[in-house]
Image (cartoon, rainbow, N blue to C red):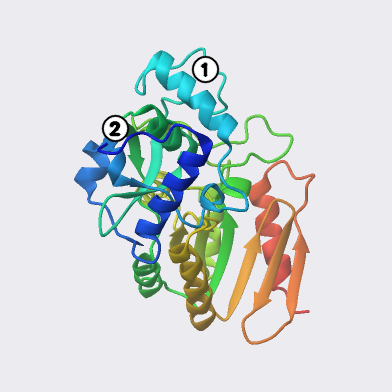
């Protein structure tokens, strides 16, 4: 970096405010190329930008300087790219920053602001990054164009699809064998492929949501691997950024225009709502069932019976 690294908390706060000012109201997310996601593993600090709407950048909350100081000690002792086996930080300082490609230049930090801050303060010029291909508005529009029905089912990826049924230690599908870093540690709940096929056969589009910063392409591959018919995948739904807030509003509007009803499935309940009314229908999922997916199918059939 051409600047002197900000050393004290006050100096860093001033530095952070200036960095936020440079991108606020200017940046917007863009789709990274496949080659960049595969081969770009480092970025210079001047290409890494703090997220203006993240709590880290808010003056009333701001960064945790104790965490930054811990990362500083890690960087000084071990360097930015070594495995820190003795680090006391909650997140390993050598882990890549999760970032999103933006215009006009560089990357927006999604996860790793405190590591970025520590690197800035000790004068490190480059950090490891992992480029995340989050769902964008044009992705949603394309997904809706390929949809088949005017009814949809929604599920939370982390709380439902990736979560085993309570009491079942063997409650997962066979592990993915492909050598992809993200996919190797993800396992889908037992019966999800059969459930998704059942729901599709019933005349419902299937949408899966996650608040985490997961790449859209990796999730698409995962569901193709398990032969799961999925209409839409929405990632990063909890991200705190102007573009993210706008996308959530646009998403809600697009869904209301497209779908007459929505069935949401969680671990214990199926809830159906209707776009043109405040009415709803609800059915419990039998927790005593040996197979969660079968219990969901039975609850779904109950929900479809005339009231």
- What x and y, as percent, mark residue 247? 46, 68
Q: Earlier in the sequence, mark 1 or mark 2?
A: 1
Q: Is residue 280 above or below residue 98?
A: below
SS assignment at label 1? loop
In whole angstroms, how far apart are the C-alphas of marks 1 and 2?
A: 20 Å
Q: Could you say which disc has been placed on residue 126 in the image?
A: 2
Which image quadrant is residue 183 in? top left
Residue that carries the numbered disc 1 in the rendered image = 87
Residue 92 visible? The answer is no
Residue at 51% across, 62% down: 207
Residue 272: mark in rendering: none
Is 255 on the left or on the right of 265, as rendered? left
Of residues 198 and 85, the one nearer the viewer is: 85
**Residue 26 drawn at (x, y percent):** 34, 65
Q: Decide if residue 80 is in sight here.
A: yes
Q: Position of residue 291 (x, y in %)?
A: 67, 43
Left or right side of 181 for 238: right
From what the image shows, is residue 81 above or below residue 2? Answer: above
Q: Name the foreground residue: 307 vs 186.
A: 186
Q: Position of residue 144 (x, y in %)?
A: 40, 72
Q: Residues within 10 Å of mark 1 (few under 14, many from 20)?
A: some
Q: Nearer the viewer, residue 172 or 159?
A: 159
Q: Quadrant of the C terminus?
A: bottom right
Left-right relation of 219 to 106:
right
Name the residue at the left extreme. 35
SS for callout 2: strand
**Residue at figure coordinates x 52%, y 17% from the top left:** 87
């Amino acid at each position: 970096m051409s600047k002197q690294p900000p050393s004290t908390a006050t100096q860093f706060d001033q530095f952070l405010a200036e960095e936020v000012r440079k991108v606020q109201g200017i940046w917007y997310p863009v789709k990274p190329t496949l080659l960049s996601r595969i081969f770009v593993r480092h970025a210079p600090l001047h290409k890494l930008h703090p997220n203006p709407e993240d709590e880290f950048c808010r003056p009333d909350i701001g960064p945790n300087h104790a965490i930054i100081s811990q990362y500083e000690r890690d960087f000084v002792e071990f360097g930015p790219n070594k495995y820190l086996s003795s680090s006391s930080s909650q997140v390993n300082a050598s882990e890549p920053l999760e970032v999103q490609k933006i215009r006009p230049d560089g990357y927006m930090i999604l996860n790793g602001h405190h590591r970025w801050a520590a690197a800035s303060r000790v004068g490190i010029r480059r950090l490891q990054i992992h480029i995340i291909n989050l769902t964008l508005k044009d992705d949603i529009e394309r997904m809706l164009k390929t949809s088949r029905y005017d009814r949809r089912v929604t599920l939370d990826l982390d709380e439902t699809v990736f979560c085993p049924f309570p009491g079942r230690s063997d409650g997962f599908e066979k592990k993915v064998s492909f050598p992809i870093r993200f996919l190797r540690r993800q396992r889908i709940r037992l019966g999800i492929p059969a459930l998704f096929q059942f729901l599709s056969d019933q005349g419902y589009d299937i949408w899966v949501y996650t608040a985490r910063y997961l790449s859209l392409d990796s999730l698409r591959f995962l569901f193709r691997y398990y032969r799961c018919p999925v209409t839409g995948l929405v990632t990063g739904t909890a991200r705190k950024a102007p573009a993210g807030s706008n996308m959530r509003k646009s998403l809600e509007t697009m869904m209301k225009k497209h779908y007459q009803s929505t069935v949401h499935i969680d671990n214990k309940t199926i809830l159906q709502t209707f776009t043109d009314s405040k009415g709803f229908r609800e059915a419990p999922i039998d927790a005593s069932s040996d197979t969660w997916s079968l219990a969901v199918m039975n609850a779904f059939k109950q929900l479809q019976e005339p009231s």
